[in-house]
Amino acid sequence: MGRFVYNSTLNILLDDEELSHLQAVIGAKFRLQQSFYFSWTRPANTGEYRSTIWLTPHIPLQFHYRRALGAALDRDRINEMYAQANSPGGLLLVIDP
């Protein structure tokens, strides 16, 4: 499990493969100085089902990976995630328990 850290305060545990795809999408959006909503789901037993933050290039992000080698990226998956990030509702990531 890797970690996505937003503004040094929010930590989201993600599979390294999911984290790699998320990094690719966020990097592409931020290179264009574009902000967007990012939502993720949590297992129902946490008492909190969905969370949303506003991602902007001006707030620090960190990507921490469990494995030293990067996961292979799926271009179709990245394109789907990027298109979703461009939508009014933003990018929704469903996190498996």
Image (cartoon, grey):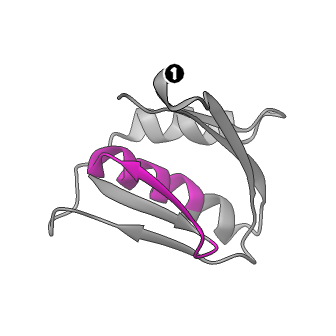
Q: Secondary structure at mark 1?
A: helix
The quarter holding residue 89 reads top right
| Residue located 76% across and 69% down the image | 33
52 in the magenta segment: no
Q: Position of residue 77 (x, y in %)?
A: 43, 34
- Residue projecting furthest to the top: 44
Q: Residue furthest right?
A: 88
> Does the magenta-highlighted stretch encompass residue 16?
yes
**Total count of labels:** 1
Residue drawn 22% across and 53% down?
A: 71
Q: Residue at x 30, y 45 (%)?
A: 15
Residue assigned mark 1 = 44
Identify the residue shown where x is 33% and y is 40%.
74
Across and down, in percent, residue 48 comes to: 61, 32
From the top left corner, tell me how far across and down residue 32 is, in percent.
Answer: 72, 66
Judge left or right: residue 97 versus residue 54. Answer: left
Q: What type is the residue that disc 1 sits on?
A: Ala
Range of residues picked out in magenta: 7-26
Above or below 47: residue 38: below
Front-lying residue, 29 or 94:
94
Classify 89 as above or below 60.
above
Q: Outermost residue toward the left?
A: 68
Q: Nearer the viewer, residue 55 or 45?
A: 45
Q: Measured from the top left, where is residue 68 in percent x and y? A: 15, 69
Q: Quadrant of the C terminus?
A: top left
The foreground one among 21 and 12 is 12
| Neighbour tally class for label 1: few under 14, some 14-19, many 20 plus, Cα within 10 Å | few
Residue 43 sits above or below residue 72 on the image: above
Image check: 40 left or right of 4? right
